[in-house]
Amino acid sequence: MTAWSRGDGWGVVDRPDGNVRGGCLYAAPLRSGEITVLVGASAVVARAALEGLDVTAVREAAAAGLGVAREDIDADVVDDLLDDLVRLGLLQPR
């Protein structure tokens, strides 16, 4: 199973509590400073991946973080988001 770590040269500010279920996670490459904002479910998924969890554990963490059953988490959507975050550079497989 793939697990991830934060991409080189990226900064992250995490605001798990807030007005949105799942909170917000702000990420930016330190050189360009272009900020990516992940809100709600996407923030929960990114947060779990940044903790170094594998894909199964990311899905479980997403369910727990959103207060839903594991079966309510769409595996394809999680996989697509993780792939997008790798392409962006925020995540790198380890």
Image (spheres, rainbow, N blue to C red):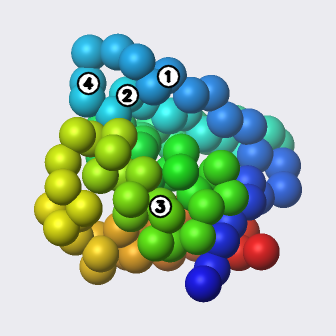
The image quadrant that residue 40 belongs to is top left
**Above-or-below relation of 40 to 72:** above
Report the residue marked by disc 2: 23
Report the residue marked by disc 1: 15
The image quadrant that residue 65 belongs to is top left
Q: Looking at numbered disc 2 in the image, what kind of residue is underneath it?
A: Gly
The image quadrant that residue 35 belongs to is top right
**Above-or-below relation of 14 to 3:** above
Residue 33 visible to the viewer: yes
| Labels 2 and 3: the sequence-earlier one | 2
Residue found 26% across the figure and 41% down from its top = 66
Give yes or no for contact between labels 4 and 1 (Cβ–Cβ under 8 Å): no
Report the residue marked by disc 4: 20
Classify mark 2: helix, strand or loop.
loop
Q: Looking at numbered disc 1 in the image, what kind of residue is underneath it?
A: Arg
Classify mark 3: helix, strand or loop.
helix
Q: Looking at numbered disc 3 in the image, what kind of residue is underneath it?
A: Val
Query: In the rendering, at what x and y percent does residue 42 appear?
Result: 37, 49
Q: Looking at numbered disc 4 in the image, what kind of residue is underneath it?
A: Val
Q: Is residue 75 left or right of residue 37?
A: left
Classify mark 1: helix, strand or loop.
strand
| Labels 3 and 4: the sequence-earlier one | 4
Query: In the rendering, at what x and y percent does residue 12 appear?
Result: 66, 35
Q: Nearer the viewer, residue 59 or 16?
A: 59
